[in-house]
Each structure stands twice: as structure tokens, then as C-alpha cells.
Amino acid sequence: MSENPASSNERPCLHCLIGDLIDEFYAEYGTSTGETDVIDMDETLAALAKTVADLTHGTDLAERQRIKDELVRDIAEFEAEYEKEPGPGLRH
């Protein structure tokens, strides 16, 4: 995991695992246009949106809307938090 040698008994941070996977994917495959060391934000956001849709499939409309609303609030909250943090790569 990213710069966090955790004991085998600790549960890994899902945020860090997803970030590492995205980094590894683009390091190995690059973007669809062939660029290396670049993360395609459109492709990444589409993948995350598909993941949320897949995870919420089968829930009722009100619950899906609640999840989407919470996701938007969380994004705004973390953006504000990250603006205060010095340096890139805010992984645990």
C-alpha cells in the first residue's frame, strides 16, 4: 500500500487501494491515446461511476439518489480538506 507499512491484522484503506490500482493501471497501459505517466480523468471517472452504479444496482430509486447525493457531498468535503493539505498524493 502507498507508503504505509501496515500490520497483517490491519484492514487496508480502500481509498489507497483504489488509488494504487488506478496508478498501476496507467503505468502499465497508459491512456487510450498512448500517453504514459498520465491519468485519463474522463476514463477514471467513468469507471468510478460504473462501479457506483453496479454497487447500487437493485436498490430502490430513493436509496440510489441518497447515495449519489452523499457522494457529491463527500467529494466537496474532501476537496476542501485537500486544499488545506500541503503536497500531492494524500494517501494514508
Image: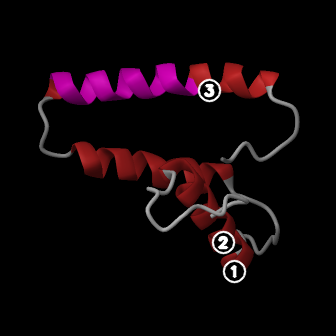
Mark 2 crowdedness (10 Å alpha carbons): few <14, some 14-19, many ≥20: few
Q: Position of residue 86 (x, y in %)?
A: 87, 32
* 74 in magenta: yes
Residue under the image location 38 percent in, 21 percent down: 69
Q: Which mark is residue 78?
A: 3
Q: Circle 2 is placed at which residue position?
A: 24
Secondary structure that dominates the magenta span: helix
Residue 32 visible (yes or no) = no
Distance of mark 2 from mark 1, alpha carbons? Answer: 6 Å
Pointers 2 and 1 in contact (C-beta within 8 Å) = yes
Gap between marks 3 and 2, in whole Å? 23 Å
Q: Which residues are magenta?
A: 62-75
Q: Quadrant of residue 68?
A: top left
The mark that comes first in sequence, 3 or 1, is 1
Asked whether residue 44 is in view, the answer is: yes
Image position of 49 (left or right of 76): left
> Label 1 belongs to which residue?
28
Depth order, front residue of 54/81: 81
Whole-angstrom CA distance, mark 3 to mark 1, is 28 Å
